[in-house]
């Protein structure tokens, strides 16, 4: 029997959409190119994950100059969220309007924060976010409280929070999707880039896919790689072609949703020759400007297991040249000696010493949309031409953070920027907007050119802001699901 809806991809966008549509009774088929991530020793092995790249795909992308690199995407049920830090933070209200940065001015959103806010609240409830909206002065209006209290600081982080306050900062608890008691009991890994096989991380599989598959009208097809969308003369998408276990397949449905991620959704549209009347598919690729910052004290150890509990947004909206924004600061998952040895090339004894005496932070600044920053195809090659923007603001944020950490009592502060191999929140490539000449999707993520094609993943984001995008993608997925619930699929 033909399904009512085909969703391509089971990451945050596709899984959340499926969970919201499942109670309607409509027949939903989810095509996921990957498999379920089974529990294995490598899931808790620093060397396997960071040294050998055990879970990274056997895939090569290219720069415009022809240099090959292995991207940091993951292909499992749940998508990249299986490895994410589960930071579920809202864009600030100011991010929805044009915002002047050192590197340029953002276009803002085609809808307001107030119109979007109920969906943020619903997404926080779905993903069981732990937080406190009263701690951060940049926090936008909430229509309700977080479902759970924030994750408590371990002793070294409680000390850091106090030190940051003493130098005039206002640290706040990170909003997190984690069952912290279960994580500490069953996983006990440093969190970031470690997959969850315990059910403690509120990722797209644990929450979205699990909710969706609780309904008999939802089916998940794993190992099914979508290769092409087919559209008729009237613009309607008539079929999805895919390959499962080496065998070509074809599926039809009145409505098709593409949720393969910012790069792969753009690739599938380009390969299919669809949704590109505006010449905007693949353009405006954004990837946060990010750096790891390690604060060390030779006489103090950091024995935290789960240190990722606080953020600083004092410089989110100001602090740069002429009062321009700098970005967000948050804690990383604890970096171990083997992680440092694998990623920074340090000798093992030195890496172990640094890791045991360091608190690990993550500085993140907005990457501005640029039509020249784009994903293209060269035959079957995926070419990523990332034009990093607003870098001077990011350098200023890192400099300011390092100075404040020294004032807070850390005599040694090191930093290292992330490069294109690290998917620091890839987004854009099929942005939403009200004008079909300058955008790919409408405000409900429907393709302007195709009445039954939607794109619900990080592709739709018109701006990257300077916070983790997962909650915003989930909120939009719930908003789109509400729109589709009242829609005649045959229209």
Image (cartoon, helix red, strand yellow):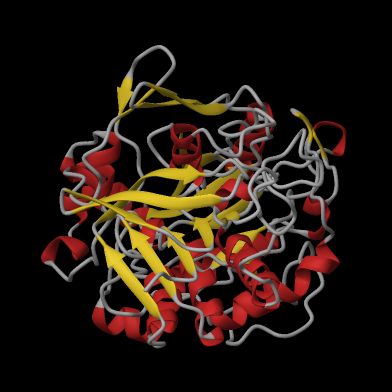
Q: Which quadrant does the N terminus fall into? A: bottom left
Q: Position of residue 159 (x, y in %)?
A: 53, 68
| Residue 204 appears in the rendering | yes
Quadrant of residue 105 in the image?
top right
Asked whether, in this view, residue 61 is left or right of residue 235, the answer is left
Q: Position of residue 16 (x, y in %)?
A: 52, 71
Instruction: Please report the residue visible at 33 percent of the width from the left and 71 percent of the height from the top.
Output: 220
Residue nearer the viewer, 14 or 143: 14
When the figure is inspected, residue 350 is found, relative to residue 34, above or below; the finding is above
Instruction: Please report the residue visible at 78 percent of the width from the left and 76 percent of the height from the top.
Output: 142
When the figure is inspected, residue 57 is found, relative to residue 133, above or below; the finding is above
| Residue 203 appears in the rendering | no
Residue nearer the viewer, 316 or 127: 127
Q: Position of residue 334 (x, y in %)?
A: 37, 59
Q: Position of residue 68 (x, y in %)?
A: 30, 22
Instruction: Please report the residue visible at 33 percent of the width from the left and 26 percent of the height from the top.
Output: 380
Residue most toward the front?
233
When the figure is inspected, residue 279 is found, relative to residue 431, above or below; the finding is above
Asked whether, in this view, residue 3 is left or right of residue 403, the answer is left
Residue nearer the viewer, 348 or 44: 44
Residue nearer the viewer, 223 or 309: 223
- Total labels drawn: 0
When the figure is inspected, residue 139 is found, relative to residue 177, above or below; the finding is above
Instruction: Please report the residue visible at 58 percent of the width from the left and 71 percent of the height from the top.
Output: 175
Residue most toward the top?
65
Q: Which quadrant does the C terminus fall into? A: bottom right
């Amino acid at each position: 029997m033909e399904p009512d809806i085909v969703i391509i991809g089971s990451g945050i966008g596709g899984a959340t959409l499926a969970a919201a549509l499942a109670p309607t009774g409509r027949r939903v088929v989810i095509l996921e190119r990957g498999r379920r991530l089974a529990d294995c020793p490598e899931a808790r092995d620093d060397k396997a994950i960071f040294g050998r790249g055990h879970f990274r795909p056997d895939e090569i992308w290219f720069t415009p100059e022809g240099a090959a690199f292995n991207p940091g995407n993951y292909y499992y049920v749940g998508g990249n969220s299986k490895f994410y830090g589960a930071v579920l933070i809202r864009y600030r209200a100011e991010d929805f309007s044009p915002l002047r940065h050192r590197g340029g001015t953002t276009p803002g959103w085609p809808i307001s924060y107030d119109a979007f806010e109920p969906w943020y609240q619903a997404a926080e409830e779905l993903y069981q976010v732990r937080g406190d909206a009263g701690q951060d002065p940049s926090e936008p209006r909430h229509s309700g409280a977080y479902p759970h209290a924030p994750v408590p600081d371990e002793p070294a982080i409680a000390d850091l929070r106090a030190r940051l306050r003493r130098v005039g900062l206002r640290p706040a608890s990170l909003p997190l999707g984690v069952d912290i008691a279960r994580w500490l009991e069953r996983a006990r890994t440093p969190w970031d880039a470690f997959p969850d096989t315990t059910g403690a991380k509120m990722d797209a599989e644990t929450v979205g896919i699990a909710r969706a598959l609780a309904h008999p009208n939802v089916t998940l097809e794993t190992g099914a790689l979508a290769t092409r969308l087919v559209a008729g003369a009237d613009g309607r998408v008539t079929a999805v072609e895919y390959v499962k276990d080496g065998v070509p397949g074809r599926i039809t449905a009145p409505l098709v949703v593409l949720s393969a991620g910012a790069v792969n959704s753009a690739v599938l549209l380009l390969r299919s020759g669809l949704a590109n009347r505006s010449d905007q598919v693949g353009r405006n690729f954004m990837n946060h400007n990010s750096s790891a910052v390690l604060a060390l004290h030779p006489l103090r150890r950091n024995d935290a297991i789960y240190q990722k509990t606080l953020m600083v947004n004092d410089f989110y909206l100001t602090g740069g040249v002429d009062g321009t924004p700098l970005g967000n600061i948050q804690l990383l998952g604890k970096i171990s000696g083997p992680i440092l040895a694998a990623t920074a090339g340090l000798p093992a004894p030195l890496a172990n010493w640094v890791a045991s005496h360091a608190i690990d932070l993550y500085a993140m600044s907005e990457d501005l949309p640029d039509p020249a920053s784009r994903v293209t195809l060269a035959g079957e090659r995926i070419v990523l031409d990332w034009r990093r923007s607003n870098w001077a603001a990011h350098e200023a944020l890192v400099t300011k953070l390092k100075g404040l950490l020294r004032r807070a009592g850390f005599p040694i502060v090191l930093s290292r920027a992330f490069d294109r191999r690290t998917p620091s929140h890839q987004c854009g490539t099929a942005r939403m907007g009200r004008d079909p000449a300058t955008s790919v999707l409408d405000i409900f993520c429907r393709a302007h050119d195709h009445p039954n094609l939607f794109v619900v993943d990080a592709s739709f984001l018109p701006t990257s802001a300077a916070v983790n995008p997962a909650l915003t993608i989930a909120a939009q997925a719930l908003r789109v699901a509400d729109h589709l619930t009242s829609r005649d699929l045959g229209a």
